[in-house]
Image (cartoon, grey):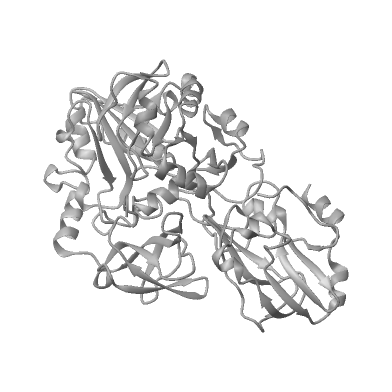
Amino acid sequence: MADPSYPADLKYHPEHDWARIEGDSATFGITWYAQDALGEVVFFDAPDIGAEVTKDQPYTEVESVKAVSDVVAPLSGEVTAVNDGLAEKPETINEDPYGEGWLVKIKLSDPSEADALMDSTEYQGSLD
Amino acid sequence: MPTMFMWAARDWRRRFPAFIQGRRGAARDGGIAATRGYIPQAVSSTTELRRTPLYDRHAAAGARLIPFAGWEMPVQYGGIREEHIAVRARAGVFDVSHMGQVLTRGPDALNFLQRMLSNDVRRIPEGGAQYSVMLREDGGVLDDLFTYRLADCEFLTVTNAANHEKDLAWLQAHAGEFDVDVLDRHADFAMLAVQGPNARPLLRTITEGSLPSRFHACQRAVAGVPMLVCGTGYTGEDGVELLLDPEHASTAWDAIVQAGASPVGLGARDTLRLEVCFHLYGNDMSEDRNPIEAGLGWCCKEATGFIGSEPVARARREGTAEKLVPFVIEGQGIARQGNPVLGGGEVTSGTFSPCLERGIGMAYVSTARAEPGTRIDIDVRGRTRPAVIERKPLYKKGA
């Protein structure tokens, strides 16, 4: 499992989700803290392409052997891609939570929502 | 089978508000249900939890500790899946010191236990072990138990941690008309389980004398520590359980780990037992269910006249409306405790099976739908997940 890290180029939601924002689109995932707390992920319930997600609302679930967690959308928009590789290897979420373990790509409906998210330093401060 | 653990909130469906500092799951009777939300990193010190004599060993090994039945117990060391596989492929050692012990001794010990326990206690030889349930008058299950016959008139019964005080009170309340002493021995024992195909070979390297066969027990010195070695377990693998003086638990633990057993937490203990369909008290059986519907008729010998034998005999004769069955999810998804079975019924235990790599579990369904091969649909938090009722065990060695 990867060492703890919270990349500076990401935005963070207090429910332990991250967003990598590129213009009016974004990639979402869960943070190192979340995957560590959950344990080895055995199932990612991918949402449908085209599904609407709403900031602060759960849009899917991840499960480890003995735990289930909602995954909360850090921003609002429409799902344009899901990480199909997670169906075969959901543990990628543990091994590379900010890279190969991404969950969905989103067409943002209101990029200004990102102003409410935390940067890496603020998020790490919230974990203490 | 007697035992277990769980971390988990009774209402695990509820979304936990982000990460609460400190503990997330709440201990509850019976099994490990799924925890809703992420498992916390650390256990806070706000509640009074009992610690086993091996607490320092668990902490030093980096175990994730959770409250379970009033105890602070290791749920996992590295990861549940790797610990599970270690037991199936090699050997694991579990600290199960939270489990309770009751000593029954005296001239009437046999007759007393014959009245209290569902199985035929006369059939336990000295040095033997037997599984049974203890019932209320109406047939509801109070606990499931292993009883070891230490001597002609001396029996040691292992209780589930969450039920220990209740069991002790029930036994003592019924002891009056018998010439028998019923003694709480929980504080006098640490308990370890060493399980897996390599469990006996590795123990032989540190044990003076032979190991007991399955369902037998004997006094031995392991790593120089005198203890009761019992040929029992809760994993579906060969192995033993060890009852010993808490003062020497660390010495024994260290020697067993040194001999090659991997520390295994309560998380894998639950997945291991569910793969082989061993019952977990509080999940798969309760005071609201009789042993016939729970599939435990095999350990009930009504002719012995135990408390609750009449309703058991009636349920066996007339049948029950529902029956506990094992199932495997077809395709994706993991059913969890409390998920409804469409058309009637409920999941009592559900997890991801590391060996089958699928969602598995046990559920009560109507007896008409309880045959192996029957397809059922389970409502997993709003998603319908098809499943097939299987024969037990779900995991078969070498299959």
Residue drawn at the location 38% of the way across and 49% of the way down = B273
Residue B305 at least partly seen: yes
Q: Is residue A56 above or below residue B218?
A: below
Q: Is residue B147 left or right of residue B122?
A: right
Q: Kindly identify the residue that appears in the image at 45 percent across and 67 percent down.
A: B339
Pick the front one: B11 or B198: B198
**Position above or below: B385 against B42:** below
Classify B159 as above or below B228.
Answer: below
Q: Position of residue B334 (x, y in %)?
A: 48, 64
- Give how far across and how far down residue A24 sits, in percent: 83, 79
Image side of residue A107 versus residue B319, left or right: right
Q: Across the whole image, how many numbered discs are drawn on residues?
A: 0
Would residue B95 be visible to someone looking at this image?
no
Q: Quadrant of residue B111?
A: top left
Q: Position of residue A40 (x, y in %)?
A: 58, 54
Task: Looking at this view, name the residue that lies furthest to the top.
Answer: B224
Foreground pick, B302 / A39: A39
Residue at the outermost left position:
B303
The residue at the point 42 percent across, 37 percent down is B91
Residue drawn 31% across the image and 53% down it: B396
Corner quadrant of residue B209:
top left
- Residue A63 is situated, as x and y percent measured from the top left of the image, at 56, 61
Q: Is residue B316 left or right of residue A67?
A: left
